Amino acid sequence: ARIALRQLLDHAAEYGYGVPAFNINNMEQGLAVMEAAASCDSPVILQASKGARAYAKDIMLARMIEALSEIYPAIPICVHQDHGSDEATCMSAIRHGFTSVMMDGSLEADAKTPSSYEYNVAITERVTRIAHWLGVSVEGELGVLGSLESGTGAAEDGHGAEGALSHEQLLTDPDQAVDFVARTGVDALAIACGTSHGAYKFTRAPDGDILAMSVIQAIHLKLPNTHLVMHGSSSVPQEMQDVINRFGGRMPQTYGVPVEEIERGIRNGVRKINIDTDCRMAMAGQFRKIASEHPEEFDPRKFLKPAMDALGNLCRDRFERFGTAGNA
Ligand code: G3H
Ligand code: 13P
Ligand code: NA
Ligand code: ZN
């Protein structure tokens, strides 16, 4: 059954767990996430980026999710628009059956300049008002995802950032968060704490200087009833890097967000944890492995099935560690 983000995260807050939000673009990813959820009795958040919607086409995604909820009738499914950049993206998602949208008004510009902050408040408030009429939840974002190591916000959208950003700009301000939530009415708030999108988050195992979990604690103290969202939450596991590199890949050594840090976040109000890169790496490692070990193979299913199994194992692990398992 379909569930709105609000209902799901209210339950998660009451019982003290977090919910991974996995990005999906196709049938194999949808089936793998759902199979993992069913195997450990977890509710799921399936999220689609603008890119995913363009790749699979809205109607394909919508019918696929309808099919998944028929195949797995006991699993609550929240269908979420990841990083909606404007009203049209959010409203068209709702039209296609999404039960939750992210209105990311922080994408437009650095949210610390007064005009862009007001822009973010205004557009997020508008989308939230309309979405709520329709029973759909809204996630907003305040802050610039980016590296405290290099001082760039480049990782947020993949475009190079001009000029360095200060630590203050790269971390969500707790007082501004209080104002933002009060003025927009969002159901969940994405915050910036030093994580960034993609595989190259940290050049060393992160400590408190470059992964500022203390910011989450500070925000949670001021907003104890707001569901917090961590973007850029892939752990970029060493073993996945090793599989990719063992079979001809070339990924330079990198570090992600340790699962223990996410567990700490969950104890401090984090309820939604966005994961895409780890899912991609789980599948890509198996593609490389099959291609390398079975060069005679050309049946796509022989590549996709092991890739789905690897993705499923990742999902099951996160459902268990985040405490989502058993809550369907
Ligand atoms: O926000 C970033 C997610 O990893 C989605 O990536 O826009 O390439 O689908 P994408
Ligand atoms: P990762 O790149 O760390 O998986 O983050 C995904 C994300 O935040 C999607 O919104
Ligand atoms: Na941002
Ligand atoms: Zn994100």
Image: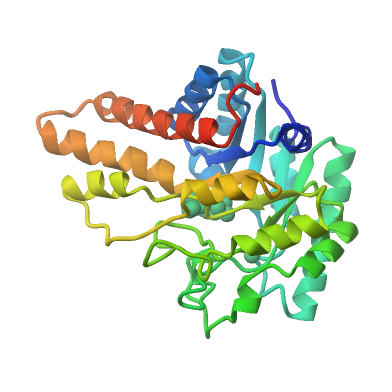
Q: Nearer the viewer, residue 186 or 212?
A: 212
Question: In this orientation, does residue 257 appear?
Answer: yes
Q: Which image quarter is the N terminus in?
A: top right
Q: Nearer the viewer, residue 259 or 20?
A: 259
Q: Residue at x 57, y 45 (%)?
A: 263
Q: Is residue 148 rendered to the left or right of residue 285? A: right
Question: In this orientation, does residue 49 appear?
Answer: no
Q: Position of residue 107 (x, y in %)?
A: 65, 65
Q: Nearer the viewer, residue 299 or 290?
A: 290
Q: Is residue 268 rendered to the left or right of residue 232? A: right
Q: Residue furthest bottom?
A: 163
Q: Is residue 201 rendered to the left or right of residue 23? A: left
Q: Is residue 68 rendered to the left or right of residue 108? A: left
Q: Nearer the viewer, residue 256 or 132?
A: 256
Q: Residue at x 74, y 60 (%)?
A: 219
Q: Quadrant of residue 202?
A: bottom left
Colour scheme in use: rainbow
Q: Position of residue 142 (x, y in %)?
A: 71, 64
**Is residue 69 positioned above or below 293 on the image?**
above
Q: Residue furthest left?
A: 296
